[in-house]
């Protein structure tokens, strides 16, 4: 399943997202969700401890001026990568 986190991790139910992810799922951080990829954040630590892959959209990082503050443990993708993730998952959930 592809989970897309579009709101700040401070304004969503991140614990619920973490309870619902399963091994092999992907999480894509979009819009204000990119805040969850900040190096050293509790949200990032929680995501990295789950059996998932974490991606973040480059354009949203750039729009918020956060590209230099993002952890190297997440994969940065552009819109083409976003589309590939969406196509590779038949089930998707937006947070």
Image (spheres, helix red, strand yellow):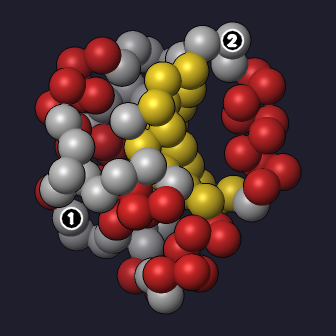
Residue of label 2:
90
Give above or below for 60 relative to 45: below
Left or right of residue 22: residue 16: left
Q: What residue is at 84 percent from the left and 51 percent from the top? A: 80
Q: Secondary structure at mark 2?
A: loop
The picture quadrant where one finds residue 51 is top left
Give above or below for 24 relative to 75: above
Left or right of residue 11: residue 86: right
Estimate the x, y position of residue 92 in percent, counting from the top left: 56, 21
Residue of label 1:
41
Q: Quadrant of the C terminus?
A: top left
Left or right of residue 54: residue 63: right
Estimate the x, y position of residue 85 in percent, counting from the top left: 71, 34
Task: First in sequence, mark 2 or 1: give its number.
Answer: 1
Q: Quadrant of the N terminus?
A: top right
Q: What residue is at 80 percent from the left and 36 percent from the top? A: 84
């Amino acid at each position: 399943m592809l989970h897309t986190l579009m709101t700040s991790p401070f304004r969503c139910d991140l614990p619920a997202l973490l309870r619902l992810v399963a091994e092999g799922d992907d999480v894509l951080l979009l819009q204000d969700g990119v805040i969850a990829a900040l190096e050293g954040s509790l949200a990032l630590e929680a995501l990295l401890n789950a059996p998932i892959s974490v991606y973040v959209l480059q354009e949203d990082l750039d729009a918020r001026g956060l590209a230099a503050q993002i952890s190297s443990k997440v994969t940065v993708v552009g819109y083409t990568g976003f589309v590939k993730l969406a196509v590779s998952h038949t089930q998707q959930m937006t947070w």
